[in-house]
Amino acid sequence: MENRAYALAAGSFVAIVVALFIAGSLWLSGRTGEGVPYVVVSERSVGGLLPGAIVRLRGVKVGQVASIGFDPTDSRRIFLPIVVDSGIGLTQDTYAKLTFTGVSGVASIELDDDRTTRTVLLSSAENPARIPLRSSWLSDLSDSSAALMNSATQTSQRLDKLLSDQNMDHLSRLLAQLDDASVQISGLATELRPTVRRVDRLVADSQETVRSLRPAIRNLDSLISDTRSRIDMLDALREGAQELRRTARNLDQALAHDTLPQMSEFARRLSRSADRFDEVLQQIKEQPQSLLYGPAPGRPGPGEPGFQPVRGAPR
């Protein structure tokens, strides 16, 4: 009987311990039995994340990961169903990131939003809303490290090619040629020193020449001014000649079109007057008495009184 009582007491103790463990686990995990389902969608690796992992909203625990699986329609995407406390209202710009705690590398999901909208993200068990999983700083560091390692590998390969035996021999010859060139340049500089001194003297002589040329330049300026004034006088003379030429042309046109015809008419009239004056003189010469008595009447013609036919004249 004592053994049975002992076994019953031991079984009861184990059952109580298991019940307390389950209750403590539920309390520590924050499970209340109620929550809003969401699906976090990732196209990256979620290594270190396990079902039951904690879900936090800006550092505050609000739920846990229900399971982990692939998208049935696209194996490149991973579905992470989560359950969030019903009192938490997520917005439509909410996103998720993976965070790692301690040195053990235990992963959890951190929720946050972009603060661009206050519209609530509606979700239900029949149609759970999807939340994108963005890359965390650790994954970005991992990608950057991989790219950096790749770049370092390429750089080391290029250095190996650059520092090959052939290139090293070529570099040694190049350094030797540079050494010889530096020696030659040093000797050339020594030889050029007298030339530089001559150039200095030449520059000084040139400056003296320039100073001596300044009076000549000033005289040249005055000569240019006199030349300009003479050119202005020549321009005035040329304009006077052109005006005289135009006046002569106008005079010629006036003589050709007006004066010469008038003089010709005057000459014709003078000629007629001279002919008449000659006739008058001839008449006076033949009949001087006409000056006193006027000109003699003319011989009467046929049918006029006193007409006498000339004898021997044809009838």
Image (cartoon, rainbow, N blue to C red):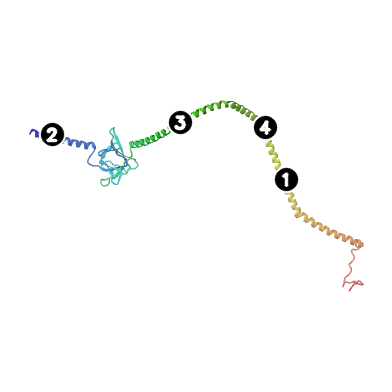
For the residues labelled 3 and 4, say whether their Cβ atoms are less than 8 Å apart: no
Q: Quadrant of the N terminus?
A: top left
Q: Which numbered tag is attached to residue 169?
A: 3
Q: Quadrant of the C terminus?
A: bottom right
* Mark 3: few/some/many CA within 10 Å (<14, 14-19, 20+): few
Query: Outermost residue, left direction?
Result: 1
For the residues labelled 4 and 1, say whether their Cβ atoms are less than 8 Å apart: no
For the residues labelled 2 and 4, say whether their Cβ atoms are less than 8 Å apart: no
Q: CA distance from mark 4 to mark 1?
A: 36 Å
State which quadrant residue 4 falls in: top left
Q: CA distance from mark 3 to mark 2?
A: 87 Å
Residue pictured at 81% horizontal, 57% vertical: 267
Q: Amino acid at mark 2?
A: Ala
Please report whichever mark, 4 or 1, sits nearer to the chain's N-terminal start: 4
Q: Amino acid at mark 1?
A: Ala
Please report whichever mark, 3 or 4, sits nearer to the chain's N-terminal start: 3
Q: Which numbered tag is attached to residue 10?
A: 2
> Considering the numbered disc 4 on the image, is that residue within a helix, a strand or a loop?
helix
Give the residue at mark 1: 241
Where in the figure is residue 200, as x and y percent of width and height?
A: 60, 27
> Considering the numbered disc 2 on the image, is that residue within a helix, a strand or a loop?
helix
Q: Is residue 7 shown above or below 239?
A: above
Query: Can residue 58 be seen in the rendering of this structure?
Result: no
Q: Amino acid at mark 3?
A: Asp
Please report whichever mark, 2 or 4, sits nearer to the chain's N-terminal start: 2
